[in-house]
Amino acid sequence: MSCICDGDVVEGTVQDAYGKPIDDADIYRAEFPVDPIGGSDAKGKFALSGVCISEFALLVKKDQFMSVRVTETENRRKREAQNVTLNIKMQQLAPPVITRHPQSKVRLVGESVTLCCEASGVPSPSYYEWFKNNDVIDGFEESSLTMDNLQMSDAGSYKCRANSEAGAQYSEPASLTIYVAANDACSSDPLPHWLKLPAECVESSGYEYYNVETVKVLPLNEDFSSVYHAVSLARKSQPVTLKGNETSTIFLGNTSDENTKAELEIPEKSFYTEDGNLYTGEVKAAVNFYDPSDPSAVDVMPSDLNTRDIEGNTQQLQTYGMLSLQFQDDGGNHLRVDNPIVVYIDPVKAGIDLDDVDENGNLLTRLWKLDTLSGEWEDMGGLEVVSMKRRKRRTESFLIGNMTVRGYNLNYMNIDKVQDRRRTCYLNVRLFRDETLERTVEKASVTAVSADRSDSRRSGQLYYFQRAMTNTEGRVCLMTFCERNGELFNVHVNAEKDDEILKPIHPDNVPTNKHPADWPIDLKQSVILPSDDNGPQFASMKAITPQMSYENLFYDRWYDQYDYERIENQDHGPFYWQWRDRYSALRKCSEADSEENFMVFTYPEKGLEENTAADDEEEDDRSPLSWFPYEGSQKRACFIKIFVNSTDTGRFQVFSTGGEVPDVKDRLFGYRIDNSKKSADGSISAACIEFKCSGPIRIGDPKNNIASPPAPPDAGRTIGTDRTILRIVPRLPSNCQLKPGNNGVNPGLTTFLTINGIVDELSISGSDITFKVPDGNINGPTTGIYGFQGGRNKSYKSAYTNCLAGDDNAYSGGSIDAPDIGWAFQYECS
């Protein structure tokens, strides 16, 4: 029985999250929510007589809103002798939105699996349901589904459904694949993947996709289950036409007879179709030459330069040039070469030393072909020195090699020699997120190129390279060539991850508190860093190791008095060498601690990056893709606030795409990339990133004719009102994850999208977010989206300041150190 106090009055207003009055809200005594004791009027106001102000509990209900329980101590604004005034806020119901979809899994019979599903909404989901092949699974109402001792019958398609009083939503399906044995899970055949051609490369037939036929050997570490590789491919050169019934000559490295380094002579009647028939028609020959003087050429080479001797030991090759040869008939079908081919090489132009021979006088440089199954190079035969006259030249010395080519297509050929393994070293490289050297970078690809620097004639012409992945400590040891005084080899090193190029750090600029060792002076002085941040980020240095630098040690004479303890048991690096056993050198490099030397790479510091489809400052007339449809006092700028709830900052990219107007629908207005800014104490941060405001899409308005303020737009200039689609993507070097559920998506934003009927277009995939921004009042502190209208730069500066502060009035004064106030999305970064 509730108490009744004659003369006491409880009055107030009922409003939504944006302060808009809510009419026809029913108010009940909380202990008896059947018959209402009052309600709100058209202005959201109410007055209840007889409700004791000293102790009461009310329940406020309204269709499409969450019920609110109000007690004597809550929401009180003013209290006098016999009345109390309340301001009751109600949140509009928002159906669940899946923020974490279950992911497809692969398991073996007898193993366990857990599928996860999370959703946000107003209110939060009260329970979840799980479905297998569209049939509900009884007994599971949590956000995760765990199954033990899996059997083949458990394989299938799984999805969840999040339920609340506001509605329900299904997740995307996830497949559970189960195998009896591990070797059943993988196919040795690669899956086809079609790549779209650049706009300037569409074939005359209108075909727009590459049919990639190539070999690419990629480095993998045993401890990684997945690795991302950015694969670079060389474009085929323009084909030359040969006649299948005549002896043909192909110039290698240059199309000019006078300047060519080598020639390939193919006898008549050497081409056969894939079904074995002789082909005598026109042959299209595509010849690509990979120049060993360019370190960046390793990106498009099919494999590193390894081979095996007759005992199965791995050996390293140094190359004078690599060739890719492909032959097709006039219909584009592949042809095989099934006759001996003769190679003529000019040793002077190729930089081959004719005195570089073995103990029997045989030239060390030989011909090699790539075994596309193993990824290693196979010996095709030696080269013979012959004095002869080729074409119009005078009599000269040429290297001649005969290749017996039968039954396969001659795709890749090398002119190489095996390097003496006693010159094998290992370079210690470590990758970090930034120059503090606090956080390492794993699963990154690092390449070391050993180039010849012995004299001007051969400088850069002869090299070996190796590419490998960093481990969980951000470390990798790469094989290079080196020698005692740094006169023979240069080493070029670069690093990248997920298409991001890392920056080499000079050893003088590495923090001594993290890396106290100092490089040998002659090695440190040889380090050259790239001068252009936009070019290839190779660090170059002499390949010299301290263990080789003692006077009693010479490469060609291995003295018995070699002092192993004194020379090799010292702290050293970044190059490691051991004359008796290169695997010991690799082990010493791999086990080196931070007291020893290593080459350092970090992610380059990046600030704001911008890209806009239409340049508003330079175009003569306004384009539908213009970032700003108006100038002058009607110019409007918009920002979205991303809160990072961790000590590590994040980097985010925000794409702005047309959403509805046909002229801009699905077309990119542009994007912005920026880092989150830390709070004063450094514990949290936030990124305020500009996007293309929703609103009018206009054409016309030549800049030199714009009034200030401009005249109202006419029908011919405004072609529609668009709602911009935003896509938010975390970017490297940060590793940012969206917080789950309501912790990741601001409920105020969800409500705002619901009111505008577009909450279903909020899509979350992992940590990527896509949603449509309504036009009109966007109420920054509630939604995390900020806008400001004003001439010149006022709109940009004011909207940005408001966003940082989480306050629509901060531009006129106040604190802007408020990363955790008024945000749209919340992440954690590491």
Image (spheres, rainbow, N blue to C red):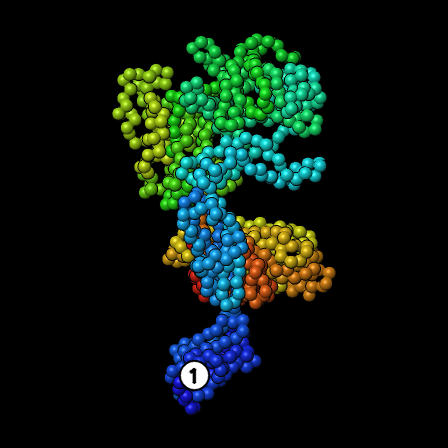
Vertical position of residue 180 compared to residue 123: above or below: above
Foreground of the two, 753 or 508: 753
Q: Position of residue 596 (x, y in %)?
A: 32, 35
337 relative position to 184: left or right: right
Foreground of the two, 129 or 208: 129
Q: Position of residue 491 (x, y in %)?
A: 44, 29
Residue at the farthest bottom position: 6
Residue at the farthest right position: 716
Q: Identify the residue shown where x is 55% and y is 50%.
A: 610
16 relative position to 198: left or right: left
Q: Identify the residue shown where x is 55% and y is 14%.
A: 401
Task: Residue under label 1, please give it.
Answer: 84
Query: On the rendered image, what quadrant is the N terminus found in?
Result: bottom left
Element under label 1?
A: strand
551 relative position to 299: left or right: left
Assess disc 1: are there few (<14), some (14-19) or many (≥20) residues with their C-alpha within 10 Å of its C-alpha: many
Vertical position of residue 684 compared to residue 492: above or below: below
Q: Position of residue 137 (x, y in %)?
A: 48, 56
Q: Position of residue 772 (x, y in %)?
A: 58, 59
Q: Quadrant of residue 70?
A: bottom left
The amino acid beneath tag 1 is: Val
Residue 639 at least partly seen: no
Q: Identify the residue shown where x is 42% and y is 10%.
A: 359
Q: Identify the residue shown where x is 53% and y is 32%.
A: 216
Give the total of numbered labels: 1
Foreground of the two, 439 or 39: 39
Residue 5 at least partly seen: yes
Foreground of the two, 565 or 507: 565
